[in-house]
Amino acid sequence: MQRNTTLNLPDKLVSRAKAYAAEHGTTMTAIIRSHLEAVTSSGENPIADDPLLAYSQGQLSRSEAIRMLGMRDYAELLVALGDADLPMPSAPPHEIENQATTFTKLWRQS
C-alpha cells in the first residue's frame, strides 16, 4: 500500500532535488524513499526488506525480483515499479557497450 505524504520543503531545495533527479533518471519520490529506507532499515538484509527497490537499484535480477515479490511476470513487475514511482534499473556499462557494438555492426550491414 502506498501513501501520499505532504512535505514542507524550501523552494530552492525542491528545485535542486528536481534537477538532481532529472540528471540521474529518477524522481524526488524515489530519492526520498531510498533515503528513508536507508535510515530506517535494520541493515540486516536490505534486498529482502524491499526487493522492488533493490531491483530498481540493480541489486537484483529481474527473475529474482519477480520470485521474491511473488509476481507472475515481468509486466507485473513493471507496473509495480511505476506504482512505486521507481526507475527501471540501468544496464551495467559492459552490457551497454555490447549493445552499442552490436547495433553498429547491424547498422553497417544494412
Image (cartoon, rainbow, N blue to C red):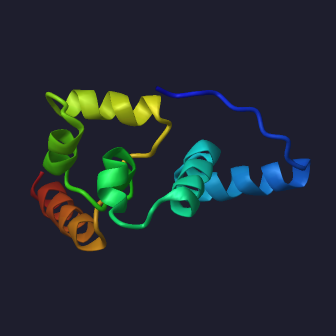
Closest to the observer: 110 or 22? 22
| Residue 77 screen position, x and y as percent | 27, 34
Q: Is residue 33 left or right of residue 77?
A: right
Can the viewer see residue 49? yes
Q: Is residue 43 above or below residue 17?
A: below
Tell me if residue 89 can be seen: no
Q: Is residue 72 left or right of residue 78?
A: left
Which residue: 55% across, 47% down?
30
Of residue 14 and residue 100, the one placed in the foreground of this image is 14
Residue located at (30% from left, 62% from top): 59
In this picture, residue 82 sits left or right of residue 2: left
Q: Residue at x 24, y 38 (%)?
A: 69
Residue 46's x, y, as percent? 37, 60
Say left or right for 68 vs 92: left
View extreme (bottom): residue: 94
Residue 62 position in % (x across, y down):
19, 48
Q: How many marks overall?
A: 0
| Residue in the picture at 46% in, 43% down | 86
